[in-house]
Image (tube, rainbow, N blue to C red):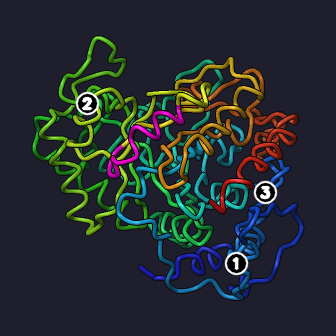
Amino acid sequence: MEINCVNKLLKAFDEDIKLSENNDFSVYYALGCSKKWVANILPYELISLNIKEAINLIMTLSEGNIFYEKFPDIIETPNYGDNWGRFANYIELNNRAIAQMNYDRTCCGTVNTIKLLPAIPPSARSWANCVIISQIFPNIFGDSYNKAPDVENSIYGLVLNDGYSKNIISENIDITPDEQLRALCDLAHFRGLKIGFRMVISAEQMKVRYPDCEQTFDWGNDEHLEIYIQECTKLMNLGFECMFIDSAKHIGGYDCANYTGVGRLPEYPKMQYILNEIRLRSGKGNISFVGEKSSDDFERYRMMGLTAGTDYITGDDFEAVKALSESLKYYRDYAPGVEIENDNYEGGISFEQRLHRINTALYAYYRASDKLPSFMQTNDIFPLRFDTNTHHIMMTNPSYSTDGTPISHIKNLFMEEGRWYNHKVAELFAHALCR
């Protein structure tokens, strides 16, 4: 693989690799340091850029105030130590929902995710911001197609051993899917961001595809287990460094009365083995494994190998979060986090409540080095239109285009009032990033 995949991506779009400044957007600065990003925007303003304009903008936002006329050959991930995931803010971007939708077909979610990176606040001095992408593997229910808003096309059902989702890959350009994902990781790292992906573990929500057949995933099948580990390790080797694990609370049969997934889950020792193997095979001791709702029996999840867990506490009660942060300050390798919104959200949180929760996530501690992790969705940065929600676009893949064009979909997916809200979110981050 060519090391400089960003240059290869530019060439694939018939662009030269010499970069120039892009000063067309409102730049927000952290108070007291040189961290910067763009805000007071609507997503279509960035997604309508061509790939070179987007990369020019990323380079213009260089934290060191050095403009690189050529993307560097080697980019390292921001270094926050091996346990960075214990303190991070996780922001999930639904890369399928923001993909290009041409009539009934979907593609190119990775390129559009790259275009949105300038609008994600970079990491702070004391803790990282980590982008999680919602889809990376093909989904079972109609990958590469968008359907009506009431027709299931769930991201939670995926296919292993069959490459990446066509929803997120650009197929008609001269750059491999691996290289496209590597370019995404390198550009995120240049932006001062960590990056990860969502993964399911419910057996009947996964298929394993072979050249001549397809099998329902089985945790008792050693070949299936090996494929699962290999797929995740491959992504870590491309530059990903976080894996968000759906339904992690219930691993080993724990609290299954509240389990809503479909199919068996791995046993506790097997999950320990999986996470350890991914770390060993990738050679990365700093991977953050985040468990959905893995938040009541802290020691159980810490010993499993997780770094953080969701759904212990929302940001509604600032003082309760601050007290929890203080009580867990000596636990440096695992902590439950503050939820602003999760992937099951179906509506009901006002702008004011959402902003209050973000404020809590960013400031509810005595020392910035002791903050809890937090969890946000696309909707927390760029508000979705009123008649959809986070869970809906995870379960379905509708196009909201009024004329069949991709940019019409992006314009109509997000609400116009989101510009003011995006500005208010930026103000909260501006006061936090130099801590």
Residue count near mark 3 (Cα–Cα under 10 Å), binned few <14, some 14–19, many ≥20: many
Spatial CA distance of label 1 from label 3 is 20 Å
Q: Which residue is mark 3?
A: 46
Q: Is residue 329 in the magenta section?
A: yes
Residue 332 vertical position relative to residue 4 in the rendered view, above or below: above
Nearer to us: label 1 or label 3: 3
| Position of residue 226 in the picture relative to residue 409 (left or right) | left
Q: Residue at 29% x, 36% y: name it.
A: 207
Earlier along the polypeptide chain: callout 1 or callout 3? 1
Between 25 and 401, which is closer to the camera in this rendering? 25
Spatial CA distance of label 2 from label 1 is 42 Å
Quadrant occupied by the N terminus: bottom left
Give the extent of the magenta segment. Answer: 321-334
Question: Seen from this angle, which residue lies furthest top?
Answer: 257
Q: Which residue is mark 1?
A: 14
Earlier along the polypeptide chain: callout 2 or callout 1? 1
Q: Which residue is mark 2?
A: 203
Residue 51 vertical position relative to residue 275 in the rendered view, above or below: below
| Position of residue 290 in the picture relative to residue 316 (left or right) | left
Q: Residue at 43% x, 52% y: name it.
A: 164
Q: Residue at 27% x, 66% y: name it.
A: 282
Residue 370 vertical position relative to residue 118 in the rendered view, above or below: above
Q: Quadrant of residue 327?
A: top left
Q: Position of residue 167 (x, y in %)?
A: 55, 47
| Position of residue 379 in the picture relative to residue 46 (left or right) | left
The total number of labels drawn is 3
Between 150 and 127, which is closer to the camera in this rendering? 127
Quadrant occupied by the C terminus: bottom right
> Residue type at mark 3?
Leu
Secondary structure category for the residue under label 1: loop
> Residue type at mark 2?
Ala
